[in-house]
Image: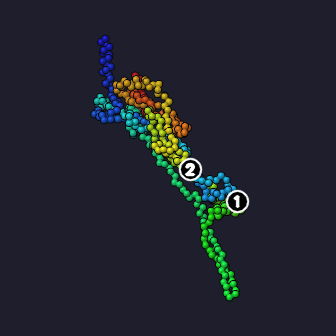
Amino acid sequence: MYKQLLALLGVFLLLPSFAQIRVVHVEDRAAQSTVPGVYYALPKTYLKFDVTVVKTEAVPGPYHEFAEEMLGLEDVPYSGSVEFSIRDVILEDFARPDPEQFYFVEYGEKALKEERQLLLSLSEAGMITGFNTTGETPASQNVTFPQDLSGTDDYSYFRYVAESNLYEKVDTMLRKITIDTLTIEKEFYKTSWAQKAVRQKARDAVDFLERIRENRFLLISGYQEVNYGESIKYMDEQLQRLEKEYLSLFTGVTITTVYRHSYIFVPDKKETTAVLFRFSSSRGVIPAGQSGGENVSVEIIPTGSSEKIAAFVQSKNKQNPLGNSIYYRIPEFADLKLVYRGEGLFKSNLQISQLGLVTYAPVYEPGIEFYPETGGVKKMNIEVK
């Protein structure tokens, strides 16, 4: 009996020598501590969606009503139309300190008096990356937030529509001059400028289009020009460009404008589904709080990779660590979907820190390292004596 009591007393006497640090979860923000120490945070996963939207605008040509009559072209647009579509979705996940998971590392008097070092490695944002390790501390992630690339509408695509808008009009006038019994008729010419009718301007455009095609044929057949290096190629490209511009006066043009929108979503255990924005094929992107369009929702479904150990971890967490223990995360894998009209626009599988578990691990002399993005254990050195 005496030997058992002596052995038990020896255990209690040895505990303070190992209890060099104490880690406290900062739950009461109003509370203050006079004990020397330092704060660290566990990472929280943020999701950034870059959504690329394309606006396609069809503009009818000013001479579209003469396209079939003068050029034999059918199915040309007779009215304008605008359509929006989602082209691409890019997902970027990054870590930031979790405001609900801040911890205070208390350094006891024994740790301050001893010569041994206690090294706590943190990122620039204050997230823990290691304890008693000499590994490099990673820098904070730089996340860019691009502005909307709202292309400016350019209405200079029908620049030849006003070419030669006026023509010279000559009127012939007869004047009779009577001298005695002699009557003389004299012609006078009156010149004026008149505006061309739409049909006449369309006819002029067709005539010029035929001249372009004729000159291009003569060019590529070698009738008009001798090829010096790239000269014929350059002239042919210019004639094709000019032909396309004159043809657009009848066929119209299609204008494509690209927009890029960025959204931040923070997954939570209580709310893993949310409306990111609303979308309409006629109006494009609509903020989530406004009416119109249909919801574009993000859905996150945990895979349950940490469920099997959840009960064990919760039971372990109820036991307060005696010391030399650091809190860390066990991240959870989750399936992510961006849903519009019941269809998945984007799918991915990734680790999300806050959907997992928080527990603690003992810190031995060689130390422990953590992944800065998720807060999970990266490397733990254990000396067995």
Q: Nearer the viewer, mark 2 or mark 1?
A: 2
- Where disc 2 sits, the SS reads strand
Measured as percent of width and height from the top left, residue 141 is found at 44, 41
Please give left or right for residue 332 compared with residue 319 in the image.
right
Residue under pointer 1: 217
**Label placed on residue 380:** none
Q: Is residue 253 visible?
A: no
- Would you place residue 9 above or below residue 96 in this image? above
Q: Residue at x 49, y 48 (%)?
A: 148
Q: State the residue lying farthest toward the bottom.
A: 180
The quadrant where residue 1 appears: top left
Measured as percent of width and height from the top left, residue 87 is found at 55, 44
The quadrant where residue 34 appears: top left
Cα distance in 3D space between marks 2 and 1:
37 Å
Q: Nearer the viewer, residue 19 or 125?
A: 125
- Would you place residue 115 above or below residue 265 in this image? above
Residue type marked 1: Phe
Q: Residue at x 61, y 58 (%)?
A: 62
Q: Which of marks 1 and 2 precedes in the sequence? A: 2
Please give left or right for residue 238 compared with residue 89 in the image.
right
Q: Residue at x 70, y 59 (%)?
A: 217
Mark 1, other Cα within 10 Å: few <14 / some 14–19 / many ≥20: some
Please give left or right for residue 41 compared with residue 209 in the image.
left
Measured as percent of width and height from the top left, residue 48 is found at 47, 41
Q: Residue at x 42, y 40 (%)?
A: 140
Residue under pointer 2: 82
Q: How many marks?
A: 2
Residue type marked 2: Val
- Where disc 1 sits, the SS reads helix
Q: State the residue lying farthest toward the top.
A: 1
